Image (spheres, helix red, strand yellow):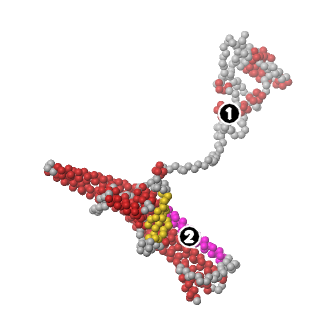
Amino acid sequence: MEDPWADSAGTSQAADDTTTTNTTTPSTTAGAPAPATAAPSSSSSSSRPSRITPRRLVAKPTQLQAVEDDPLGPLGAAATPPATTPAAVGEDASPPVPPSKELPLRTTMPAPPSSLGGGKRAGPPDPHRIDDDDDVLLFPPAGPRQPPPVQGALPSPVRTTAVPSVSVEQAAKPVFNITVGDPHKVGDLTSSHIVYSVRTKTTSKAYKNPEFEVKRRYRDFLWLYTTLHANNPGVVVPPPPEKQAVGRFESNFVEARRAALEKMLNKIAGHPQLGLDGDLKLFLESESFNIDVKHKERKEVNLGGESKGVLGSLGFGGGGSKFVEQDDWFHERRVYLDALENQLKALLKAMEGMVLQRKAMAEAAGDFSASLHALSTVELSPTLSGPLDALSELQLMIRDVYDRQAQQDVLTFGIIIEEYIRLIGSVKQSFLQRQKAFHSWHSAEGEMQKRKAAQDKLLRQGKSQQDRLNQVSAEVADAERKVHQARLLFDDMGRLMRAELDRFEREKVEDFKSAVETYLESAVEAQKELIEKWETFLMQLDAEDDETVFYRPPVVQANKPAGNTAVDRARARIDEDSD
């Protein structure tokens, strides 16, 4: 007969009896070890399930028992093999003891070795070990889990050469780099003038080549300013430097004008509206500039001024009565620009006085150097004549530093002051254009009222003058169209000038900040150079033991041509007096 407990854990009772026997009679277990064939008989007799009785699938329960004496816990009990008694072998048909508590099925999985021993694996847990993660999920530790060690990010060996992303507007906007250089004088005595080389590098597809160079003179720059001002009413066009009748071929003046013209062209090319003007393209690219300009002006005359667009059709050049500003915003900006212009002019005057003072100091240093040199020539003692001559040379170097600093002050700070004084004049020209647009608008309204009055008069006379009535009606419609266009032009100029004045303020802050920084850097460098020269001279004076520090053997130069500088003339006079 098949054992009804064939599928159950029949060794539970035998294991319990064996454990009890081992704890009560330890001497017997130690002296007579159990044979290897001592196994529970129930396991051998019920190794195969019955084909008649249906097999039951029962989860194996886990027996919980307390461990008191064994310090190793369950690991120590499992290490000692159980001793089987004959009594346990004979009880193969007895039913097993029911479990005290049936645990869920997931707890019947084999426990990890770390939980059996009650200890932890030596060393930090490896975050890449899958079994560690399973152990933590199945057997959570008592305390909080320590985070795995995080390795710092290493620099990528792959070097990216991608350009940083920019906005669509900036990517679509062409880039210009314009330089004005190589100024040289051409022509005879009556028609002499300075010619500049204008070199352009651009990414714009509107030009034939990405890099080109043309020759231009000052009046060509003036033509560009006037044309852009007429083509773009309301836009603040950067103006060229003013004319100068006296000293226009001096090196300092030519250099200052060259820098001002270069800045003018770069600002025009960087403007969102002026940079797209066709006349700028003609100025930068045309090889036969004078011929192209005459052809363009002749074409405009043949078109009867239609190329001027709305301005030509509205008679924009006309004046009117005194303009009274109705917009408070424009009135405040006009007052502000007047005050700013006065302050900049006062600053420019003070700047010019400081430059003149530096030049006077340079001239005084030259005279002082000549006097020291004369004194060193009449002094017989080399211990005194040497330092005097060295001090004379030092004063010449100081003179050069003062001259260079005066020129740098003009090119760094003075040029930006003059530029914004001219820009304020250009802004006032835009204000004047807006006033003319206002007068044109009201003039068109007055003309429309006259046409409507004539139309009403004809309507009261009846249908006797139908042809005249049709003509007057067409004139009224044309006058209404002009009024509408003039009103739109005035409003558009107002919005454009607001944007232009905001742009003017932003650029003013950036330009003056950059100019002041450059001015201070040049002043600091000049003072450092002066300090270095004086310290070198003092070190030579401190070397009193070496008498050859300042000694210089005389150099005999026959038939040396006399110099034309102030120092040379002073030395020549001193030599003549000594003779």
The magenta stretch is 514-542
Residue at point 68%, 22% (across, down): 61
Q: Name the residue that disc number 1 marks.
A: 131
Quadrant of the frame with the C terminus: bottom right
Q: Secondary structure at mark 1?
A: helix
- The residues tagged by marks 2 and 1 sit, at their Cα atoms, a distance apart of 73 Å
Q: Name the residue that disc number 2 marks.
A: 526
**Residue 524 lies in the magenta stretch:** yes
Residue at point 42%, 62% (across, down): 289
Residue at point 70%, 24% (across, down): 63
Q: Secondary structure at mark 2?
A: helix
The mark tally for this picture is 2
Q: Amino acid at mark 2?
A: Ala
When the figure is inspected, residue 295 is found, relative to residue 460, above or below; the finding is below
Measured as percent of width and height from the top left, residue 487 is found at: 30, 54
Point out the frontmost of discs 2 and 1: 2
In the image, 464 versus 505, the foreground residue is: 464
In the image, 541 versus 5, the foreground residue is: 541
Is residue 497 rendered to the left or right of residue 545? left
Q: Amino acid at mark 1?
A: Asp
Callout 1 environment at 10 Å: few (<14), some (14 to 19), or many (20+)?
few
In the image, 397 versus 130, the foreground residue is: 397
Hey, which quadrant is residue 98 in on the image? top right
Answer yes or no: is residue 245 visible. Answer: yes
Quadrant of the frame with the N terminus: top right
Callout 2 environment at 10 Å: few (<14), some (14 to 19), or many (20+)?
some
Measured as percent of width and height from the top left, residue 361 is found at: 52, 76
Sequence-wise first label, 2 or 1: 1
Measured as percent of width and height from the top left, residue 16 is found at: 75, 21
